[in-house]
Amino acid sequence: MMTSEKNPGTEAEIHMKKKKPTVFLALLPVISLALFIGGGYIGFDLPVEPMIIAAAAVAACVAKYLGYSWDEMIESVAEKTAKAWPALLILLTVGLLIGAWMISGTIPYLVYWGLAIIDPRWLALVALLGTAVVSLCTGTSWGSAGTIGVAFMGIAIGLGADLPMIAGAVVSGAYFGDKFSPLSDSTNIAAMITRVPLFTHIKNLTWTTGTALIIGVIVFAIVGIKGSAAGVDTSAVQETLDQLAAGFHLTPWLLVPPIVVLVGAALRFPTIPVMMAGVALGLFNTFVFQKSSIADAFTALVKGFKLDMIQRPEWVSLTPSDDMVTLLERGGMNSMLGTLAICFCALAFAGIMGVSHSLDYLIEKLLHRVKSRFGLVASTIGVGLGTISVTCNGQISVIMPGEVLRPAYVRRGYHPMTLGRTLEDSVTVTETLFPWTAAGAYMAATLGVETLHYVPWAVVNWSGMIVALILAATGWGIQMLSREEQLRMLEEDDMNESHIIRYGDGTPGPSAADPEAALVEPAGGTGAHKAEN
């Protein structure tokens, strides 16, 4: 009995030792991360991993000061790593896939016909739209970039095109298709966390992500119109075609693995088994069509494909060009180890930040000052960018702010679909713009272009936020809740009419969409939301 009475007291004692973060303490790790990344990684070209670890150390000091033990920090890091583990396994599987498709001739076959058919002037536009279609059908930005995206990069190398531009086009297309695909996990999460029907959420994305695609098409179309095929060295292209034909047995059967992967993804089969099926089919083609040895085939899976693995008589007498080395020598599990290191460091930082609840505290403080439609959307974008830069995980960065922000939208009379759309604009499509996130590191490793180099050309990924702010300022595409909808949603979150925030001055009051209430409109507000007399 004495023991059973002691435990609650001990637990209460431990709980009492925990302190709430202040604004300074909550911001300190975030500011540290920005300084270390900006000064060390960007300013002095230092490796990003030590910069993230240094920021994690600052976060650990803050958590310790607030009363959290080292064991609690480790447990939080372990929980976040467990949640991210499927994505990390996908990274390794993509390395296997690229290695298998290189040595089997699948990617060389796609590159060969891309070089032979595509006009160099329109390569960026074709890469944008082609990757978008594949991503739309499969619901995976990573998968589309790791398959057809790699092929487009190979074509770009063969044509001597601007690699950062093509990588940006691939990333733009991959994330556009992912957002509009009902098969996408992040799109489903955004709809789920805001409690908006999936297809209503996707339709609402046309306001921002759809507009961003149009902007991207215009940008790359202008590049194509102003470009000229005259600058392309046709002799170098022909040399690449000849060397590809000499190095590989090019047959349409080599398209079977990517078709199987695309169909499997479209049917929503588990990602890793589908990709492993693509690896197995790639190995089959390696032995049947390329006549490679077992040792070379499995070495390519781990260490990546090398040109000296080609044993065809037509190839042995050739001297491969430098472009062929850049084009073909890639893939393998080892190529993803650097990306995994970044991910583990980022997860350590996110886990320690999570245990102190610093992010939750900062979001609550930020929303306290929001008193207008534009301020709410702008704050959501700021929270989204801040959360993804800190947690480095798209799913977590949608769920965490989504839970906190949904009541804020409902209390102010805005439909949560605007929240879901804005979270997509500021989190799920921007995660690839940060070099230290899993997505940014993955795209850089897969496409062979550093993150900060392709960012200016990833038009779809950053222009959606600009469109979202324009819509918030004008009121276009912002749906208000009816009186009944607002009260119903408040009840779902255990709130009532007293929790409603008047649209304009931030004081409790009637619904913004209540036609019988006298409302306060913000300066420049549209008459569509004013009370009817």
Image: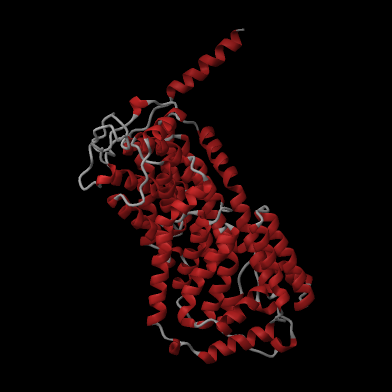
Q: Residue at x 56, y 62 (%)?
A: 135
Q: Quadrant of residue 181?
A: bottom right
The relative height of residue 386 versus residue 100 in the rendered view (above or below) is above
The answer to whether residue 315 is visible is yes
The answer to whether residue 24 is visible is no
Q: Residue at x 67, y 67 (%)?
A: 259
The one nearer the camera, 395 or 345, is 395
The relative height of residue 304 versus residue 236 in the rendered view (above or below) is above
Quarter of the image with the N terminus is top right
Q: Residue at x 38, y 76 (%)?
A: 222
Q: Position of residue 278 (x, y in %)?
A: 70, 64
Quarter of the image with the C terminus is top left
Q: Position of residue 117 (x, y in %)?
A: 56, 83
The relative height of residue 146 versus residue 359 in the rendered view (above or below) is below
The one nearer the camera, 284 or 506, is 506
Q: Position of residue 260 (x, y in %)?
A: 70, 64
Q: Quadrant of residue 97?
A: bottom right
The one nearer the camera, 138 or 150, is 138
Q: Position of residue 134 (x, y in %)?
A: 57, 65
Q: Is residue 409 left or right of residue 255?
A: left
